[in-house]
Image (cartoon, rainbow, N blue to C red):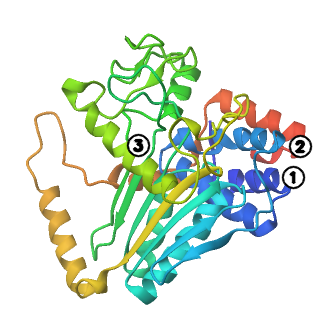
Amino acid sequence: MNFSFEQLESFTQKILRKIGCPEKDAATAARVLLSADLRGVDSHGVARLSGYVRLWEANRINPVPNMCIVHETPSTAVVDGDGGLGLVVAPFAMQVAIDKAKIAGTGWVSVKNSNHYGIAGIHAMEALKHDMIGISLTNASPLVSPTFSRERMLGTNPISVAIPANEQPPFVLDMATTTAANGKLEILQRKKQDAPLGWIQDRDGNPTTSPLGVKDGGALLPLGGDREHGSHKGYGLGSVVDIFSAVLSGANYGPWVPPFVAFLEPHPNPVGEGLGHFFGAMRIDAFRPAGEFKKHMDQWIGRFREAEPVEGQKKVLIPGDPERELEAERRQHGIPLLEPVVEDLKSLGDKLGVSWDQND
């Protein structure tokens, strides 16, 4: 069952207006949220819309935040998101980083008092429009056990880096620091499929393939899955994201990060304010002429594309290729939604008085 971007965008904006978001913020949030569906990251797209509404119902999202800079230097800033939708706070903060980079060469912004901000890549990619390299990090609900731990201490804590090229498409890395994002488990649950071994451990720290492993008290695993396959490296990367996003800004970190799901209460003794992000923008001509750099990026990308693939594979991919190809396809043919997601959205529309019929 496919739906056009415009149909889903209109529905999403109307839902967000119903919870009190100003028209401009609703438009921004809808664009950011649906960018995940366009790029094939279905776990972070419109399927999460009802989750944001539940957070608003629990008074954990401020639909009209007074986002502001609370500390800054010529090249750095801390942004207070005032409890707003991360889908709105993140674009504001990324623009601050870009504006600072225009003046100082680089801009670095750490954010506190925010919420889930969608996919990391869409924020990093904003820098591409300005011949800049973009960086986007965020901490997240503590669902991940560090190597050798039974406790859930970190989030999936994604990293995205977007780098412009000239004739070649941009290099866009967008990855969780876990073997899989929690949203992928939600998709497996809807499809009633098992998870691959190495994604999850149960409440006792043993490997499990149950997609309900985390709900049953287990945890996601850091990138690598176990120590023998380098999980300590995924643990280290996730830790850096947590520190840059939250310890640096004054947001909650580690096990104190407020959960995305509304049925779990935030930690009773928080160590900071809300959830944290970190953004960077680096003007290419602060290092070398932009045209020269992008010419060499074309050469870098082109040579990697020419690498001889292993048997059974058609080609070597560049980070960002699968997402870009899916976006082109979905803009033309529509965004596929699973039936449980459609039913959830219809139910959400009924509750808030927004008709889904226009999308049928």
Residue at (75%, 37%) from the top-left corner?
A: 345
**Mark 2: amino acid:** Leu
Measured in 3D between alpha carbons, the distance from the residue under mark 1 to the one under mark 2, in whole angstroms, is 7 Å
Q: Nearer the viewer, mark 3 or mark 1?
A: 3
Q: Residue at 53%, 40% (x, y): give it.
A: 42
Upstream in sequence: badge 1 or badge 2: 1
Depicted 108 relative to depicted 304: above or below: below
- In the image, what residue type sits under mark 1? Lys
The 10 Å Cα crowd at callout 3, few under 14, some 14 to 19, many 20 or more, is: many
**Disc on the earlier residue, 3 or 1:** 1
Q: Are marks 1 and 2 in contact (CB under 8 Å)?
A: yes
Q: Is residue 117 visible?
A: no
Which residue in the structure is indicated by mark 3?
Answer: 176
Vertical relation: 289 (above or below) 251: below
Q: Secondary structure at mark 1?
A: helix
Q: Is residue 182 left or right of residue 302?
A: right
In the image, what residue type sits under mark 3? Answer: Ala
**Image position of 308 with respect to 26: above or below:** above
Q: Position of residue 134 (x, y in %)?
A: 40, 68
CA gap between label 2 and label 3 equals 33 Å
The residue at which mark 2 appears reads as 352
